[in-house]
Amino acid sequence: MKHGLHVALVALGIIAPHAALAHQSPYSYLDLRIEPGRIEGRVAAHVVDFAHEIGLSTPDSLLDSSYVAGRAAALEALLGARLDARADGTRIRPEWIGFEIDRDRRLVAFRFRSASAASPGRIEISGPLFPYDPAHETYANVYQGAALRGQELLDASHPSATAYLGGAPGVLAVVRTFVPAGMHHIFIGPDHILFIIGLLLLGGGVGRLLKIVTAFTVAHSITLALAALEIVNPPSRLIEPAIALSIMVVGIENLIGGGKRDVRAVLAFTFGFVHGFGFAGVLREFGLPPAALGWSLFSFNLGVELGQACIVLAVTPLLALAHARRPALAGRIVTVGSACVIAAGAYWFVQRVLFA
């Protein structure tokens, strides 16, 4: 019996230090409030996290205000190094102005402020604040005055967040972010590029080409908005093969219908709905800011249109020149180009159906 008690006490002595350092709420909190000419902030973290980072063996010592005051410089330096928050790309440099202790939750919170020369439009935050613990999470809130502009949970799988503020600076920040994102998606999406080129291969006058491009634009803008707003949200396992199928159909139509009929505007409008759902999938992954939903959606779509316009302006003059001066060459371009379009569409279709 004594031997068993001795073993139990030894085991307790081994476990106790680890239990003291462990905590079941590995959370920290970051609040940023954007005011005219300044940024105010508050960072709160569990005493166990602070103790681990500064090499303190007794975390609950940090529940004593005089003890924290004696180590405030070290704790503030730690938080200053870990706090990665940026206003329009410029890192926020905290000026620490005090601390408070929440004994019930075993938290220590530090307050700070930072000068802001201009009204920022975008706040970017990276985290979590204590990456030594894989389970650690940082709750981040961004306010503009009394209005909550962004609320995110940062962890190892989601280490960054962006909040867009109100007013002209916020709108400009949204436009600067989402217009390039829309253009980038067009330029890295060979299926969308090939669909557009397939529509242009037969050539035609400015009015006809404008009609085709406009039909595609109107259709994909509708479904982009519907899907981004989660009104209609078909699964990608259906949309991606359908996009590949649309490419095949355009190529086939060029070969069997070229010179007899021109239904490219109808095809552009019909399949534009499908491509719009594809654009929306990328936009959802990129993240729509709730506080600037309309502007972000408009800006992304504008970027898509600009990217599309670049393709049209690059391809159309060359095709027009070939049709005007070398009709035989233009015919071969249509035949070979359409065959390539069909082959690529068929490859993507099989790949997306069988291996998605």
Image (spheres, helix red, strand yellow):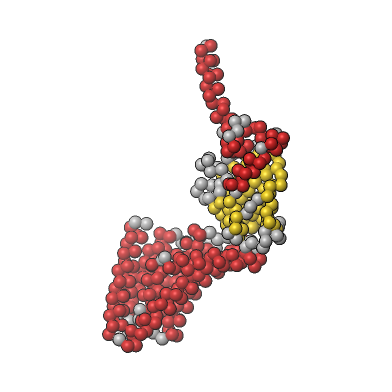
Residue appearing at x 58%, y 46% in the figure: 82
Q: Position of residue 257 (x, y in %)?
A: 32, 80
Residue 348 picture location, percent across and down:
34, 64
Q: Extreme top residue here?
A: 2
| Residue 219 visible, this angle | no
Q: Residue furthest bottom?
A: 325
Residue 312 point in image, percent of width and height:
42, 77
Q: Is residue 160 in view?
A: yes
> How far from the left and from the top, in percent, is residue 40?
69, 53
Q: Quadrant of residue 166?
A: bottom right
Q: Is residue 173 left or right of residue 275?
A: right
Identity of the residue drawn at 39% across and 80% down: 316
Image position of 96 (left or right of 158): right
> Is residue 24 or residue 37 the one in the foreground?
37
Q: Which image quadrant is residue 170 in?
A: bottom right
Classify 183 as above or below 103: below
Question: Quarter of the image containing the C terminus?
Answer: bottom left
Q: Quadrant of residue 72?
A: top right
Query: Residue at horizontal 56%, vertical 54%?
Result: 161
| Total numbered labels | 0
210 to the left or right of 36:
left
Residue at 51% across / 46% down in the picture? Answer: 156
Q: Is residue 157 above or below residue 303?
A: above
